[in-house]
Amino acid sequence: MVPLLVAGSDATLIMIDAEQKRQEFRGMGCGSIFYSGHITSFAKKKPALQEKYYDDLFTSIKTQYLQIMIRPDFEAINDNEDPYILNFPEGNFKANASSLAICKAAKIRRPDMKIYAVLYTPPAWMKTNGEIGGGGKQYATLKEGLSLELCEYLWAYLTHMQANGMPVDYLSFCNEADWEHKQPSYFLSGEAHAQLLKDLVGYLQTMSVKHPEIPVPKLVGPNMLSAVGTARKYWPAMKRLGVAKHLDVVASHDYHRAPRRWKALRKLVGPDRDLWCSEWSYHKKDASTDLIVGATEFWSMMIECFNDGANTWMAYDWAYPPREGGEALTHVEWGKFYHKTRIYHGFKQWCNALEPGMRVVQSYTIGTRSPEVHACGFLSSDSKRLVVHVVNMHDREAAMTLKLANFSPVGAEIHRTSLTKTGAVEAAKVVKKELSAELGPRQMVTIFLRTEVSP
């Protein structure tokens, strides 16, 4: 039940109840997809800048997952007619060099980084349109009878990654396969997706017996465009074929903002299964200074997804060439320089405040003057630290009062990121379990509270 609270006329009232613990926080992630070559473009002529860039991506920001693309050009023609016998020379994987370099750089800086590999499309010869692209309204798909060839392709990639010391931890065999893409993709109906999952599970079981040296990754899916489509079409189809149990992680992108979409999907898959937002970005043209509009949309979506049941959230993408789209955390001018956008700085503030194993706790936001102020709370596993992320979506200042239930802090600290601030730190006072603060325009505020004095 929502508590009966009355917010002041000029303030948004946020209540965090530390006793109402919800799902466990697993971590944050980001992708290196279409522009992995940009990320590694400094290596030859500016090696010091390359290492500095890697530090900015993987040392400065505490993420737990690196999403990479399984390219479609590792098998130009069918290697043979037996999908259980691989004939993939290592030279086939030359195009994977940049992704391997990024994975290695991430692992050096964060040895516990998990690699999540996603197949956007099988090779062109496996597809009905004979092309890498999804064909738009043609809805290009996998040719009939080639499901095991696709499985072989994935196993060859897993073998390659293992041989190069970068075993894959998590695997998806499709990406937004419910959409009329023209980018590298292929379409799968709910039934076709479920059948392909069934074939892949059987194939992995067979190959793991023959090749126990290759670790079998956890399966993530269906990895479609939205939580809505996952709940309505793909999860029911997997249940009908009895293969939903084989998904270690239920994941979806988040490009359909239907109300309560993550709550609905969480209810459908149950409380014990991991639920990921496996991709989100601000797709609209963003001409705002340093992508501040896109940045605040990022922060708002993270808050919404965790409040509504997600365990993990992944940004798209670590790097893009300079453009007005709001996707990337950094912009890279090939081989010359890179720029960290406001999206990067807010993502850094968010990620570095959290630790896997924390629990999302119940939050209530009440206020009529500032409906675009959103908040989410995370409680440490020992219940001694509380982190509250708050975002002000307004282009004007907004007042906020934070009320705490079942948590008695002895100190507080506020970090701020906006167009004019980058992780600015200030002390704050909590009086009778209340903290009041002004939120700057389009600003993310992270409030650190603790029940013990730091040594």
Image: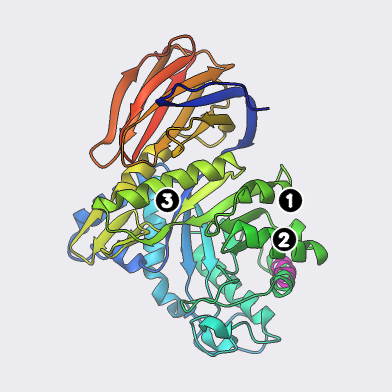
**Residue interval drawn in magenta:** 197-205
Residue 422: image location, x then y, percent: 27, 37
Amino acid type at image mark 3: Lys
User: Is 200 contained in the magenta span?
Assistant: yes
Which residue is at 58% across, 69% downward?
A: 174
Whether the residues at callouts 1 and 2 have beta carbons within 8 Å, the answer is yes
**In the rendered image, which residue does mark 2 sit on?**
235
Q: Nearer the viewer, mark 2 or mark 3?
A: 2
Q: Is residue 427 left or right of residue 16?
A: left
Element type at mark 3? helix
Element type at mark 1? helix
Q: Is residue 246 left or right of residue 20?
A: right
Which residue is at 49% across, 23% downward?
A: 7
Q: Which mark, residue 268?
A: 1
Q: Does residue 61 sit above or below 47 in this rendering?
A: above
Residue 405: image location, x then y, percent: 57, 18
